[in-house]
Amino acid sequence: MGATTPNTGAKPRLVVVGNGMAGIRTVEELLAQAPELYDITVIGAEPYTNYNRILLSPVLTGEQTLQDIMLNDEAWYARHGIRLLCNRKVTRVDRGRRRVHCDDGTEAAYDRLLLATGSNPTILPVPGHDLDGVVAFRDIDDVNRMIEASSRYRNAVVIGGGLLGLEAANGLAARGMNVSVVHLGAALLDRQLDLEAAALLRRSLEARGLTFLLQRQTREIVAGDDGRVRALRFADGAEVPADLVVMAVGVRPNTALAESCGLRVDRGIVVTDTLQTYDPRIYAVGECVSHRGTAYGLVAPLFEQAKVAANHLAMHGIGRYEGSITSTKLKVTGIDLFSAGDFTGGAHTETIVLADALDGVYKKLVISDDKLVGACLYGDTADSSWYVRLMREGQGIGALRDQLMAGEFAGDGLENAAAGG
């Protein structure tokens, strides 16, 4: 039998499976509320301490280094008495004995367990998907592989015109590669932008040298004589040369561990408003979670979940997570875009649009029942936080309606004038 975490005293034991942003944010919140409550063990699959995954894009472009995006070094874990087990995978949770088992034989006993297993990149099951030169865009190792390839090869193809795909394409272009983006949809970021904003984005990225192959379906990744990827072949038989293929077609919650130990899973580990699973001793946060039928892949909801989970782990028991209004930003220097809520609108909504093609500015606000319910901004995102706040609070916009486009400062002025009579 492998090594076992010792029980050093009367403290309850908290084991955290996942050393990423959601799990460690929960630990940070917990330490702020109840710093001495638990003996804490954190188990991570990667060989690194906690880092900011959303800043992998600027690492790829060369604007930041891996050291720049590290959030907590080994000294932080030691300072808080946290036992950190890196570079190992939890293979089994024994809920009856309350123990987790790792692939290297290590075991850890728990009184409370926090699952923060994140998500796995979706890999298209086309022939050649496992060739040398085909990578995802998910972690530090993926970024290192892309950087290495950019120093040796010329042609890159990114499959996926979503946020990650465009960030990968921009980063590889910044490193000198010829980059084509293949997307099944008719427009870029078709889940995050409307057609007008997507068209502005495409023009901006084409000006940077990117090529877009829209409404194309990948049929096969073709190998060269050396066994490495050589080209991408589409359903119509056409090919595009590729020395590197980046799969950026989405992620899916990593629920294998939860499923194997009998927790309820439905498009994610099912949790309550207190972030507890079917087993009340086991909490879950982050991209692995399904809350009220929704799995979130953005960082703001993950942090909101972390705050509530920590509140309950700290035994305060008053926090509730009721879901999040999600918003989107693209991490490409020099391109400002933002969307949140129901930005498409419909029959029972009112839409306010400002379009300035000359300056490359486009703003669309969607109103329903005197409330702001959606926003899509391109070129000027200065008021994005204000719009999210209005949506989250669900307040009637009333006299603000005619001033929404002018921004928060104008809106505050109007509110102050109204307050003053």
Image (cartoon, rainbow, N blue to C red):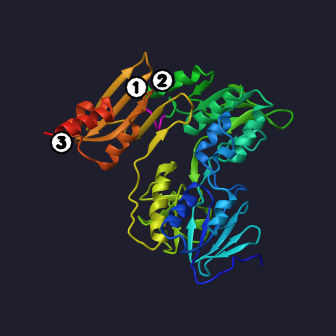
Where does the magenta region start and end?
190-194
| Residue topped by disc 3 | 419
Q: Residues within 10 Å of mark 1 (few under 14, many from 20)?
A: many
Under mark 2, the amino acid is: Leu
- Residue 192 colored magenta? yes
In this image, 306 relative to 394: left or right?
A: right
Q: Position of residue 160 (x, y in %)?
A: 59, 36
| Residue topped by disc 1 | 362
Measured Cα–Cα span from mark 1 to mark 2: 8 Å
Residue 411 to residue 106: above or below: above
Residue 22 to residue 282: above or below: above
Secondary structure of the residue carrying numbered label 3: helix
Upstream in sequence: badge 1 or badge 2: 2
In this image, 346 relative to 420: left or right?
A: right
The residue depicted at 50 percent of the width and 64 percent of the height is 32
Under mark 3, the amino acid is: Ala
Measured Cα–Cα span from mark 1 to mark 3: 31 Å
Residue 179 to residue 389: above or below: above
| Residue topped by disc 2 | 200
Do we see residue 295 in this rendering? Answer: no
Q: Where is residue 239 in the image (x, y as percent from the top left)?
A: 70, 26
Q: Position of residue 59 (x, y in %)?
A: 66, 39
Residue 381 falls in which quadrant of the image? top left
Measured Cα–Cα span from mark 2 to mark 3: 39 Å
In this image, 252 relative to 91: left or right?
A: left
Q: How crowded is mark 2: few (under 14 residues within 10 Å), some or many (20 or more)?
A: some
The residue depicted at 58 percent of the width and 33 percent of the height is 166
Under mark 1, the amino acid is: Tyr
Image quadrant holding the C terminus, namely: top left
- Residue 189 colored magenta? no
- Front one among 175 and 133: 175
Q: What's the magenta bit mostly, secondary-structure-wise?
A: loop
